[in-house]
Image (cartoon, rainbow, N blue to C red):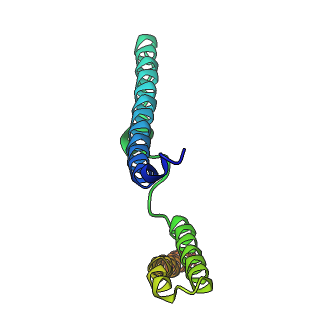
Amino acid sequence: MTDLIPIFPFLIPIVAIIMGIGSGIVALALDHQKKTRIFELHHKERMLAIERGMEVPPLPPELIQGRDKPRGTLASSLRWGLIWLFLGIAIVIGQLFNGRADIAVWALMPVAVGLALLVYYVIGRRQEVATSEAASAASGSKTS
C-alpha cells in the first residue's frame, strides 16, 4: 500500500479529466437518445394522422429548442449568485482560520462572481417590474 502513495497525486487529475469528459459524453448520448425517441413517436403520430385524414400535429418544441427550460433566467442567476457568494465566503473564512490570509485573497474571486450575478438579478428584476407596470398602465389607460 505504501508503494502506491507516490502515485496518488498523479491519479487525481487523470481520474478528474476522465470523469469530466465521460460525464459529458454520457449527457450527450442520453440527450440524443431522448430526441431520437421523441422524433420516432412524433413520426408515428404523424403517420397515423395522415392515414386517418386528420390534421398533422406540429413538431414538438423539445426537438427544436434542445432544452426543457430556457437558460439564463433570473431565478438561475439568483441561485448561482448565492451559491458562488457563500462558497467564496466559506473559503475566505476557512483560510483565515488557518492563518492563510494570502490564499484567502484568491477566494474573493467566487465572491465577486456571486456579487455580479446578484447585481444582474437585481437589475433584471427591476426591469421586469418596470415593464410589467408599464404594460399594466398602458392596458389601464386603454380601458378607461
Residue 113 or residue 68, whichever sits in front: 113
- Residue 25 picture quarter: top left
Q: Is residue 21 visible?
A: yes
Name above or below for residue 71 compared with residue 54.
below
- Residue 38 picture quarter: top left
Residue 29 or residue 89, whichever sits in front: 89
**Image x and y of residue 71, in percent:** 44, 58
Left or right, 94 with respect to 138, comes to: right
**Image x and y of residue 115, in percent:** 50, 81
- Residue 50 picture quarter: top left
Left or right, 124 with respect to 89, comes to: left
Name above or below for residue 79 compared with residue 62.
below
Name above or below for residue 112 compared with residue 69.
below
| Total marks placed | 0
The residue located at (39%, 45%) in the rendering is 65
The residue located at (53%, 64%) in the rendering is 76
Q: Quadrant of the N terminus?
A: top right
Residue 136 or residue 7, whichever sits in front: 7
Q: Quadrant of the C terminus?
A: bottom right
The residue located at (48%, 46%) in the rendering is 4
**Image x and y of residue 100, in percent:** 52, 85
**Image x and y of residue 63, in percent:** 39, 37
Name above or below for residue 131 compared with residue 42.
below
The residue located at (57%, 87%) in the rendering is 99
Q: Going by the picture, which residue comes out furthest to the top? A: 51
Q: Is residue 58 visible?
A: no
